[in-house]
Image (spheres, grey):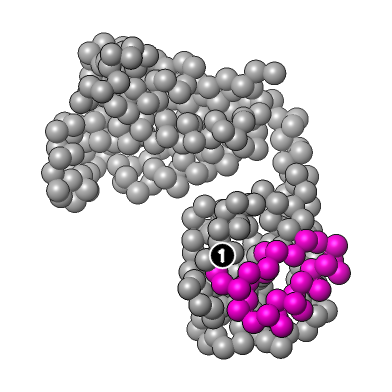
Amino acid sequence: MIRNRVVIVDDERAVRDLLERIVLRENLVPDSYGDGREAFEALRARHDDVLLVITDIKMPRLDGLEFMRLASQDFPDTPFIVTSGHGTKKEILQALKQGAMDFFEKPFGIRELSSSIGKVRLLADAGRKAEQLYGYLVRKTLLFEITNDIDLVQPLIRVLIDEAKLACRIPRNQLPGIRMGLHELIVNAIEHGNLELESELKQRADYLVFLKQRAGEPRFSGRRVTIEVGIDAESFACVIRDQGPGFDWRCLPDPRNPENLFKPHGRGIILAGNFFDEFNYNEAGNQVTVQKSFPL
């Protein structure tokens, strides 16, 4: 997919007009907004078409730094160029730390900004060719061994999903299900597997504090969760293994039985079990294997 849209964010109409002319001269499509909030909503709606965001730092409603922070959470692959007429050097440095590819002080030079846009296009072309190369991939295996730090789960899932999007012929409407299923199963391996926590403890107001304290106790701190993922063009498979004592998985509610939907326990298993095509525990109950297929 060729991305050709450039989101422009500046509260000065004259600056937006200038940036639009520069973008058009590069044979790209300008998409201009007067504040960061509107621009963020546009990025969310058209992310697949966006090559670049050019944003001012100082703006009403949502400034450039906060816009970048929000965008990095949902769209970490979107490059940013920041401009500043009123921002301090400290704010520009912060933008660079947050991942901005370049910065310009107003009034900026047209040639310099065009050159920076050209560099972004070169990087995008290289990324697109790398994606095409994945069409020749036979199979890719990823192996992670993580601690019981619950804060590692979401970043790990993001990495796995990014790999799946490149290597697997996966419809985009299937991605939320994979994210959800992996999250439930990895968290389950940490909480109920390695840390041996009962489901009732989640009712505690200080549950997250309690969980982290438990993870630091000598009895549990050395335990790990292993996540092994195999990806090819037609399937996504994952084996999640904890180092806890296991459990009798036969006592779990059948995830595909409608009568079990509203039972108080096993909700995560029901969600994951209904999304993946294959869902199996080992005999000990400390390893689960799931697979989702995307045949031709």
Q: Residues within 10 Å of mark 1 (few under 14, many from 20)?
A: some
Residue 214: x and y in percent read 18, 44
Q: Is residue 285 above or below residue 191?
A: above
Quarter of the picture holding the N terminus: top right
Quarter of the picture holding the C terminus: top right
Quickly name the residue at label 1: 38
Residue 23 lies in the magenta stretch: yes
Task: Report the front residue among 224 and 233.
Answer: 233
Q: Is residue 207 above or below residue 232?
A: below
Bounds of the magenta segment: 7-36
Residue 32: x and y in percent read 68, 68
Residue 81: x and y in percent read 65, 71
Q: Is residue 137 left or right of residue 198?
A: right
Residue 106: x and y in percent read 68, 87
- For the question of whether residue 38 can be seen, the reply is yes
Residue 19 image-quadrant placement? bottom right
